Image (cartoon, helix red, strand yellow):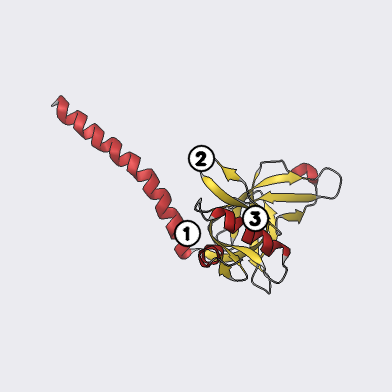
């Protein structure tokens, strides 16, 4: 009897350990399939994470919004960024709220990176999709390609992000409409 209970406990423990990673994968895949697509214009930085590998750090043009009172906001505070698309199809901040909006609008759960204290009333947002990971062998060429595109205004770079219910997944980084993975694969610069 004791052996059956032990085996059952091990099986239950194994199932629990498989459930959480599987749920995370399912949630990300669901977001990629059903999320609303947004293009966020970027600016470059490219560090290395010893635990997760090479990545491109993405800084977004649409990360600052004017607020009424600097004293109402705290650094690292969770906020909800309501977004829409401009005439060119790029993401544009409509507003920022401390209260989760209805699912009738597209929004991203983010954090406050910085609040001005000089009376200019600016709030800088830290998006949860600020890193694009690359295969180690392709990352150096991708970094150079990306940095060159940031200097060439004829080749716009942007992140393709899927948004659904406040969650967001970074799907790809594109330069002049082409995936950075494909550019690196072809050996383009």
Q: Nearer the viewer, residue 132 or 115?
A: 132
**Element carrying mark 3:** strand
Which numbered disc, 1 or 3, marks the residue that appears first in the sequence?
A: 1
Residue 31 appears in view: yes
Q: Which numbered circle lies on residue 81? A: 3
N-term mark: 1 or 2? 1
Query: Real-space Cα distance between discs 3 and 2?
Result: 30 Å
Q: CA distance from mark 1 to mark 3?
A: 17 Å
Is label 2 in a helix, a strand or a loop? Answer: loop
Residue 100 appears in view: no
- Residue 31 badge: 1
Give the quadrant of residue 15.
top left
> Which part of the image, by quadrant, shows the C terminus?
bottom right
Give the image location of residue 42, x and y in percent: 67, 60
Residue in front for this viewpoint, 2 or 54: 54
Label number found at residue 130: none
Closer to the camera: disc 3 or disc 2? 2
Q: Residue furthest top?
A: 2
Residue 82 is situated, as x and y percent measured from the top left of the image, at 64, 59
Furthest residue to the bottom? Answer: 87
Foreground residue, 50 or 59?
Answer: 50
The N terminus lies in which quarter of the figure? top left
Residue under the point 24% across and 32% down: 9
Residue 63 at x, y percent in the picture: 70, 55
């Amino acid at each position: 009897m004791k052996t059956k209970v032990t085996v059952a406990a091990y099986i239950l423990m194994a199932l629990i350990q498989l459930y959480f990673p599987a749920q995370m994968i399912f949630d990300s895949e669901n977001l990629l399939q059903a999320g609303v697509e947004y293009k966020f214009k970027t600016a470059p930085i490219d560090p290395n994470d010893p635990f997760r590998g090479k990545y491109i750090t993405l800084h977004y043009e649409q990360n600052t919004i004017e607020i009424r009172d600097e004293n109402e906001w705290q650094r690292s505070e969770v906020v909800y960024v309501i977004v829409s698309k401009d005439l060119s199809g790029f993401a544009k901040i409509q507003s920022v709220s401390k209260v989760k909006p209805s699912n009738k609008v597209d929004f991203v759960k983010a954090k406050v990176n910085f609040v001005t204290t000089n009376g200019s009333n600016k709030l800088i947002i830290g998006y949860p999709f600020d890193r694009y990971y690359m295969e180690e062998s392709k990352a150096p060429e991708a970094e150079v390609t990306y940095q060159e595109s940031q200097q060439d205004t004829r080749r716009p770079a942007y992140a393709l992000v899927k948004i659904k219910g406040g969650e967001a997944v970074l799907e790809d980084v594109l330069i002049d409409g082409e995936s950075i993975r494909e550019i690196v694969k072809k050996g383009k610069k």
